[in-house]
Amino acid sequence: MTTHWVITVEYGTGEGHRFEPLTQFAATREEARRRLYTYACEHKHRESLRQRSRHVFRQDEHTYYVQVRGAVSGHHLRYRLAELVWSTEKALLPDPRPQEPQDAVPDDPWHPPAQ
């Protein structure tokens, strides 16, 4: 099922702490997770940063902690994926009809005929 997502980045400390949305898009959960991973591995939070190394750690299925080592400084970032669950713009929300789980067992399962 396709829903709306946002990817955010957090970095800095104290008064210099920043929290920014990077992108919003519609996708399935798996597509959204792949996009989050790509951002964690490739996003440049400062254009002037000359990256020497990057370490990406998954904290949970919707969060990556990233250590970036630049030419003169190090940076610590957190990339997060968030699903839109409520909005005044109803067209953005997923279909509210309940979905049957893929592993659901029918009430009256089919049985092969007796031999």
Image: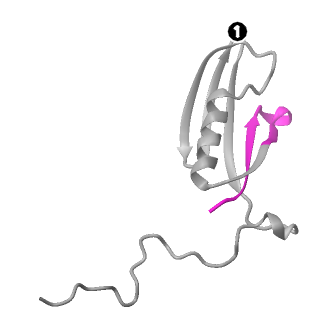
Classify residue 15 by image quadrant. top right
Closer-to-camera residue (84/107): 107
* Main SS, magenta residues: strand
Classify residue 107 by image quadrant. bottom left
Residue under label 1, please give it. 71
Judged left or right of residue 9, residue 65 is left
- Total labels: the figure holds 1
Closer-to-camera residue (18/24): 24
Q: Is residue 6 magenta?
A: yes
Closer-to-camera residue (21/74): 21
Closer-to-camera residue (69/41): 41
- The residue that appears at 31% across and 85% down in the rendered structure is 110
Residue 80 percent across, percent down from the top left: 67, 45
Q: Residues within 10 Å of mark 1 (few under 14, many from 20)?
A: few
Q: Is residue 62 magenta?
A: no
Residue 54 percent across, percent down from the top left: 60, 22
- The residue that appears at 54% across and 35% down in the rendered structure is 57
- The residue that appears at 60% across and 55% down in the rendered structure is 29
The magenta region covers 1-22
Q: Is residue 62 visible?
A: no
Classify residue 23 by image quadrant. top right
Q: In the picture, which quadrant includes the N terminus?
A: bottom right
Residue 26 percent across, percent down from the top left: 72, 53
Q: Furthest-top residue in view? A: 71
